[in-house]
Structures are given as structure tokens and as C-alpha cells.
């Protein structure tokens, strides 16, 4: 009886946790604090004026990279005959429910020390949760997978800028590379989906033999 009540309480806690994740409204956060990050003290705008206000620097960086971004018309779609070659077993593997084993393996392979996203949750925290955390993540991923709806905070990210060349001006906005910091949990689920796609792509020969990067035993 005690074991049954314990399992019921554990399941209830996990369900409440999932509901909180879906209901929380997160504000967009940028990695530029009130006094500005220590790495970026000043930037020059297009007129050569010095910008020191954190919000103005954030807008300057945003405008710069928005203008240089190239719009691509690339669209990869599979024809019916290509889909027919996949086979029912592959489709079931791709579209089947996420398993506990997949969650556990993806969590174990996640590297600690990575900066968190807007939720502030670090990888080490998730790993320290053991089997209970694997169960919680599994429930979250299953709900997302079946509903096809991502939590709002997974759609948001923090932006931090990395200096490209220390020998060049730190006031040149083009000398910084923006990095998006995503929620760790979303990256774990992304890894599960990536592994499924990779496995199927390898099995069906969709990956060119000339492709060596990001492939097992091809370095």
C-alpha cells in the first residue's frame, strides 16, 4: 500500500511539473544586462558614434546580423516514391513514442558546463536527478511528441556574443559572433530526434559517402 501511494504521489508530482512548464509565460531575455556585459563595453554605429547603452548595443547587433542574413529558398522535400522506399518499420521507428532508453542515453551523452537557456536549468542539474529526472523528462517529451506543441520557453533563447578576433577592434559589431543559448531539455529532445533521423538516413543511404563531418567512424 505504501509503495502504491508513493508511486501515485510521484506520478502526480510529475504531471503537475509538466503542467507548470506548459503554462508559464516567459519573457524574451537577452544576454545584455543593465550595465552591459564585461566583454562589450562600447560599439560603434554606422555613423561612427560610440554606443554604450546595453539596450542600444543589443539593437545594434540585432540590426547588423538581420541585414547580412541571407534568405534561402532551399526547400528539401521527399517525393512519394522516396517515402515509399522507407518502409513501414522505419516509419514506425521514426514516429513511435519516445522511450525511456532514448531519454536516458541522450541525457547521459549531454555535456556538462554548457550555458543554460531562458529557464536557467543546467545540464548538471538534470543529470543529478537520476532515474526520477529521466522519468520526468520522458513524460514531458511524450506530451510534446503527441501534441506536436513546444513549450513557449523552448521557442525563446538568450543571445551572447563571442569576440571573433582579439587583435581587431572590440568596438566593431562585425567582430562578434552571436550564439543562441537554448534550453538544455529542448536540446536533449532534439538529440533524440536527430539520432532517429541519422539512423534512418544511414540505413537508406541518404548520406553521401563524401560527407565525413558529424558521422560516426568517418573522421
Image (cartoon, rainbow, N blue to C red):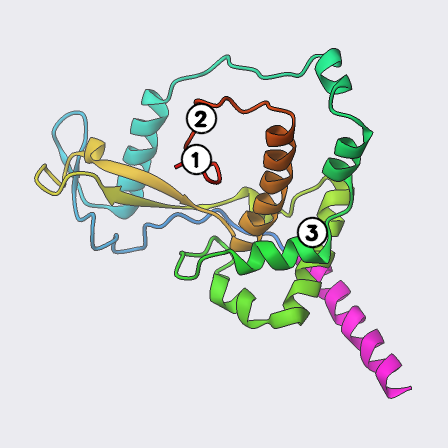
Label 1–label 2 contact, CB within 8 A: yes
Pick the quarter of the image with the N terminus.
Answer: bottom right
Q: Secondary structure beneath disc 1?
A: loop
Q: Nearer the viewer, residue 216 or 16?
A: 216
Q: From which residue to which does the magenta span run? A: 1-21
- The mark total stands at 3
Q: Is residue 144 above or below residue 213?
A: below
Q: Determine which of the numbered discs, if any, sits on residue 211 in the image.
A: 2
Say whether residue 39 is left or right of residue 219.
Answer: left
Q: Determine which of the numbered discs, if any, sits on residue 141 in the image.
A: 3
Q: Nearer the viewer, residue 119 or 110?
A: 110
Say whether residue 5 is left or right of residue 170.
Answer: right
Q: x, y (%) of residue 97?
A: 77, 46
Dot 2 or dot 3: first in sequence order is: 3
**Quadrant housing residue 213:** top left
Q: CA distance from mark 1 to mark 2?
A: 8 Å
Residue located at (24% from left, 38% from top): 176
Q: Residues within 10 Å of mark 3 (few under 14, many from 20)?
A: many
Label 3–label 1 contact, CB within 8 A: no
Q: Secondary structure beneath disc 2?
A: loop
Q: Residues within 10 Å of mark 1 (few under 14, many from 20)?
A: few
4 in the magenta segment? yes
User: Which residue position holds label 1?
Assistant: 218
Residue located at (8% from left, 40% from top): 167
Q: x, y (%) of residue 205?
A: 60, 24
Q: Secondary structure beneath disc 3?
A: helix
Amino acid at each position: 500500500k505504501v509503495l502504491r501511494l508513493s508511486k501515485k504521489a510521484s506520478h502526480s508530482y510529475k504531471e503537475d511539473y509538466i503542467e507548470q512548464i506548459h503554462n508559464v509565460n516567459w519573457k524574451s531575455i537577452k544576454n545584455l544586462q543593465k550595465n552591459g556585459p564585461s566583454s562589450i563595453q562600447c560599439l560603434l554605429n554606422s555613423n561612427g558614434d560610440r554606443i554604450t547603452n546595453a539596450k542600444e548595443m543589443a539593437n545594434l547587433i540585432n540590426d547588423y546580423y538581420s541585414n547580412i542574413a541571407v534568405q534561402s529558398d532551399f526547400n528539401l522535400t521527399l517525393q512519394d516514391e522516396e517515402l515509399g522506399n522507407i518502409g513501414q518499420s522505419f516509419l514506425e521507428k521514426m514516429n513511435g513514442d519516445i522511450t525511456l532508453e532514448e531519454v536516458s542515453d541522450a541525457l547521459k551523452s549531454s555535456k556538462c558546463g554548457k550555458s543554460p537557456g531562458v529557464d536557467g536549468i543546467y545540464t548538471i542539474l538534470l543529470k543529478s536527478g537520476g532515474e526520477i529526472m529521466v522519468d520526468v523528462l520522458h513524460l514531458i517529451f511524450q506530451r510534446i511528441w503527441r501534441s506536436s506543441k513546444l513549450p513557449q520557453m523552448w521557442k525563446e533563447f538568450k543571445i551572447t556574443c563571442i569576440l571573433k578576433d582579439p587583435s581587431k577592434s572590440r568596438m566593431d559589431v562585425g567582430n562578434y559572433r552571436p550564439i543562441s543559448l537554448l534550453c538544455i531539455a529542448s536540446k536533449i529532445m532534439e538529440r533524440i530526434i536527430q539520432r532517429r533521423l541519422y539512423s534512418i538516413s544511414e540505413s537508406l543511404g541518404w548520406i553521401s559517402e563524401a560527407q565525413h563531418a558529424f558521422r560516426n567512424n568517418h573522421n
